[in-house]
Image (spheres, rainbow, N blue to C red):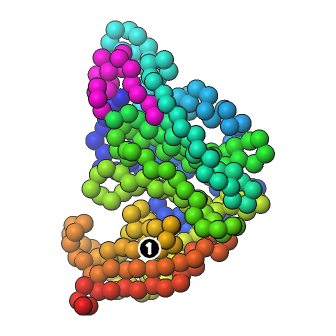
Amino acid sequence: MPRTTLSLLVMTTLVTAAPALLCGQVQRQVTTAKGGTPDAPVPHPLSWWTRNPLRLDASGDLLLGKAAPDGHVVTTQDYRVQQKVTYLGAISSHRIVQVLTTIHPGPRVISADWATAGEPPTEWKSLLVGTGKQYEEIYTLQAESGLFQPLKAAAIYGVGSNSILATYDPDTGNGGGCADGYWWFDKAGTHLVDFSPLLQAISRALPKNSTYTPNCWALHPEKSELKSWVQERDAKCPACGGLGMVEARYRIERGVAIPVSVRFQSEEQP
């Protein structure tokens, strides 16, 4: 498959409160090497999401319909597909299913120099939310070969109605980027977790003109904590202008991250 030089894909950032769609639905998060346009989830039976998955390509990396130098037009038959469907659990009666799709280019794709033999296969991650017999996709990550691999499993953290669904995949670059997402659920449907109270509490504890990482590797939903290096906002390089570390703990209440403690330790402190 074609590779492009990218410092980052389109990354999802830590979400704060956002207006929900009708019936409590959030927009579907879409992440690909060419960008991603959020859209409204559309319900289908679970089998619809797993039958012939290549037709769901939003990335354009699969080159379906493109003619090779020998005149052969690429079809789904030119790829070998593996799928792993995992039931992650349920929150507020909403069943949550993860679908990991692994796509290997076939000989015709490789011989046309669209892919390199031995390179990592492309992997997709899809998170589906089911009510009744229908499932809606709230998240899809379709990255170019190797950039996020191997993909990590999404997980449910917390207990009861205050549980959240979280997904996190770091990219393989050196910029600390990632693709991530965080949701909570009630009878009305799916909502984005609101981290704004936590982030506001952290900002109040930090020196002026400083910055930190609010998500990706810094956020640990399994521990309900955030731990990040703090640096000057106008630092000249990613490793310059270090000011210290911030550690914060929170609890989830109806999808809101309520700060429990925030501690900033400057580099001058022992």
Residue 25 percent coordinates (x, y): 69, 55
Decide which of 136, 89 is in the foreground and name it: 89
- Toward the top, the furthest residue is 70
Identify the residue at horizontal 41%, vertical 86% (top origin): 263
Can I make out residue 60 in this image?
no
Tell me if residue 167 comes above or below residue 108 in the rendering. Answer: below
Looking at the picture, tell me which residue is in the foreground, 207 or 189: 189
Dot 1 lies on which element? strand
Where is residue 48 shown, x and y percent of the image? 66, 32
* Quadrant into which the N terminus falls: top left
x, y (%) of residue 116? 28, 27
Give the percent coordinates (x, y) of residue 128.
Answer: 63, 46
**In magenta stretch: residue 110:** yes
Q: Which residues are magenta?
A: 102-119
Question: Residue at the location (37% across, 44% down)?
Answer: 149
Q: Pointer 1: what residue?
A: 226
